Amino acid sequence: MRYKLPEDYLCEQILTPASSRWSLAHVFPHYQPIIQDTLTTQLARTREKIPSIKIDFHPNKDSRTAYNSSKLAMIIEARPFPHLIPQIHHMMAVVPPDWRFLFIGSNKSVSAVGKSVGTKYQQAAGKLDLMIAPEPWSIEDQEHIWRMLTDIRFYNELLPGVEWLLKFESDSILCSNSETSLNDWLGYDWAGSPRSASL
């Protein structure tokens, strides 16, 4: 049940001494539903006035087309190392911006890398793709990875159009302070680190 008191009554109660204000405290709970209804209505009207905006600068366009399809940086790792996410993001920051990235892993490693907010952003931007090693290839050990990398079907089916490939490992990194860019090495047929170094 709702009560309505004369406005004079409320004004008198507010202006009277503190001992008389207890009657206002007694009446206030009866007005609480009216106040809540009023606030809810005003909030709903305000929400209706807020515009809903979604900007799509490139509708119906594959986000991967913003990058050079002939350049790909790739890492293959089945183990869900905790440093994979910062390593991949560091490499994306150091490698020239027109390169795309591909992470090939196991269910566990792809799931671990894919949980990152930064990874999801890069996927949406078309910069990074995550892939579980497809059949008939396996990445359970180094021998299987080498067999996959020496199979021409791997390049024809999974990497069509790729002319330059940077393959890096979970224990390798490019220096962000280097004066040489990765693109400076594109004139070579093959470049890699030595298997052993003598001091």
Image (tube, grey):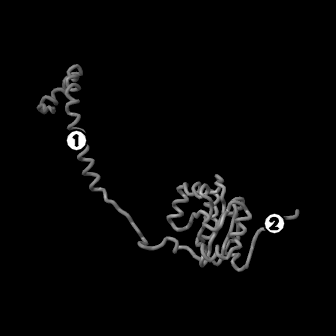
Disc ID at residue 37: 1
**Residue at 64% across / 52% down in the picture?**
82
Count neighbours of disc 2 (C-alpha within 10 A) and say few if under 14, some if 14 to 19, many if 20 or more. Answer: few
Amino acid at pointer 2 = Arg
Count neighbours of disc 1 (C-alpha within 10 A) and say few if under 14, some if 14 to 19, many if 20 or more. Answer: few
Residue 195 position (above or below residue 156): above
Quadrant where the image shows the N terminus: top left
Residue at which label 2 appears: 195
In the picture, measured across the screen, residue 188 lies left or right of residue 116, that is right
Residue 64: image location, x then y, percent: 52, 71
Q: Quadrant of residue 24?
A: top left
Amino acid at pointer 1 = Asp
Quadrant where the image shows the C terminus: bottom right
Front-most of 168 and 38?
A: 168
Nearer the observer: mark 2 or 1; the answer is 2
Mark 2–mark 1 distance (CA, rounded to whole Å): 75 Å
Residue 195: image location, x then y, percent: 81, 66
**Residue at 22% across / 42% down in the picture?**
38
Residue 191: image location, x then y, percent: 75, 73
Q: Which residue is most to the right?
A: 199
In the picture, measured across the screen, residue 54 lies left or right of residue 38, that is right
Judged from the image, the secondary structure of the residue bearing numbered disc 1 is helix
**Residue at 60% across / 66% down in the picture?**
134
Q: Earlier in the sequence, mark 2 or mark 1?
A: 1
Judged from the image, the secondary structure of the residue bearing numbered disc 2 is loop
Front-most of 159 and 70?
A: 159
